[in-house]
Image: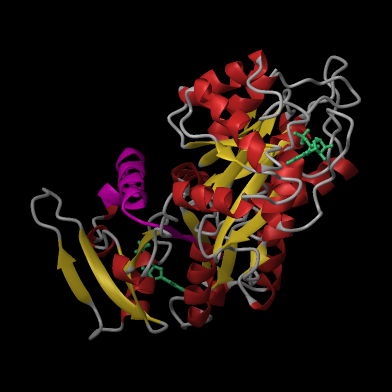
Amino acid sequence: GDWVEADLGDLEVSDDVVDSGPQPVVAIVGRPNVGKSTLVNRIIGRREAVVEDVPGVTRDRVTYDANWRGRRFTVVDTGGWDPDATGMNLRIADQARVAVELADVIVFVVDATVGATDADETVGSVLRQSGKPVILAANKVDNQQLELEAASLWALGLGEPQPVSALHGRSSGDLLDVILEALPETPELKFDAERGPYRVALLGKPNVGKSSLLNKLAGEERVLVDPMAGTTRDPVDELIELGGKTWRFVDTAGIRRRDRELQGADFYAAMRTRAALERSEVAIVLIDASEVLTEQDLRIIGLVIESGRAMVVAFNKWDLVDEDRRYYLEKEIDRQLVRTPWALRVNISAKTGRHMDRLVPALEKALDSWSSRVPTSRLNAFLTDLVHQTPPPVRSGKQPKILFATQASVEPPKFVLFTSGWLEDTYRRFIERRLREEFGFAGSPIDVSMKIRE
Ligand code: GDP
Ligand code: GDP
């Protein structure tokens, strides 16, 4: 089937896809023709954004990578959202609202030679209420005399106007310095060496081999028991060293206790599974490969997906699997687990030790996917191509447009599409599939949602 075998060679996600950290987003807003695209060109230092003398020309791309004094950020040109041939028109106030939602810093461009218009006032009031840092760029200040005109823009109530000439570059370095100052500190990725060992939930129905696997992995002398005081059931974690790293297997007391009756009770089992997931970053779901897949196996997998944790599915008792069984197992997997083709799979035997060495790389890969981030500009370049090749289906005569997308969070990766209309579920699933093809995410659930501007 489609399952990702944890053989790993081809599963590496290249470094340029997975950013070392989130990149702040700077949105450029303003009326048509004030010089947004010219300013974007100036900021990115290339003539990449298309500038047209005709107001409201649609541009293909809206996001660009920028780097000023070694600081990287993403620039969004909202000029690219102007009316298009099919008549979609994002009102200027909406445009500002979208920009506020997705950006860390907003650069509001006003034409200083014209002064503040009604439309500028409207945008200004949206931005004032946003609580986000706003930089007022007084553009087309090509010479000293025009700086006086720029001063009149104080009236917008957005603080000091920054005079700039996007076209000639005058004072653009000063503007960039102001932008840099407004950028948020890049948040650290949540996982680092100091955070301590990754927490693993070892899940599976009774008799699938959890306790055997734990014993095999731990060996006897390596096990460190870490009791958590103050709880009635005293869940006990075990710290196990594997592949040069320490892993915390959560609530192993329940696995070791072997009170079968209690473990078997559905209600209790589901509660225990949920609690273990709550306390972990990644789950190993054990499945007995020698037997038919059961409802209970599927329920456990469902709970992991619901929890948004990274997942490795280990088919245990592989020593009992013969050619025949293997054939039927693959059929069962194709049929029962169609919704999780992304899960990482290992075929192991806790009894013989078969493929124990594949478990850790699979866990690491799943966690890597789980915390990976696609740079905003890569994401949007990818979506632009995708929409170009396969546009969203037309609904009641309208073609929904994807204006911009951003990865809102990691652990697991969540994507938000800002659209001009409803995208069918099938189309969103298609996007999810293509995202996975392009960027990996093996071993992690991902989420694609949308925000609609009508
Ligand atoms: P947008 O619609 O806001 O993206 O505006 P553009 O970047 O397409 O610019 C609109 C027009 O203003 C173009 O003809 C630009 O050459 C011109 N323009 C942009 N910046 C400046 C500037 O700093 N000074 C002058 N004189 N013209 C500019
Ligand atoms: P748990 O209830 O999930 O903790 O399962 P146990 O670890 O107690 O295992 C249940 C039974 O399956 C025991 O009799 C184990 O010896 C057996 N078992 C576990 N792993 C394997 C395996 O990989 N191959 C075989 N043949 N038997 C296994």
Q: At which x and y percent is residue 214?
A: 34, 72
Q: Quadrant of the C terminus?
A: top right
Lateral position of residue 3 relative to residue 200, left or right: right
Q: At which x and y percent is residue 450?
A: 63, 31
Q: Quadrant of the N terminus?
A: bottom right
In the image, is residue 74 above or below residue 200? above
Lateral position of residue 392 relative to residue 452, left or right: right
Q: At which x and y percent is residue 360?
A: 47, 75
> Ligand 2 sits in which quadrant?
bottom left
Q: Quadrant of residue 346?
A: bottom right
Q: At which x and y percent is residue 363?
A: 48, 68
In the image, is residue 119 above or below residue 436? above
**Residue at left 25%, top 57%?**
254
**Residue at left 55%, top 30%?**
151
Q: Quadrant of residue 69?
A: bottom right
87 or 437: nearer the viewer? 87
Any part of residue 453 in sight: no
Asked if residue 376 lies in the magenta stretch, the reply is no
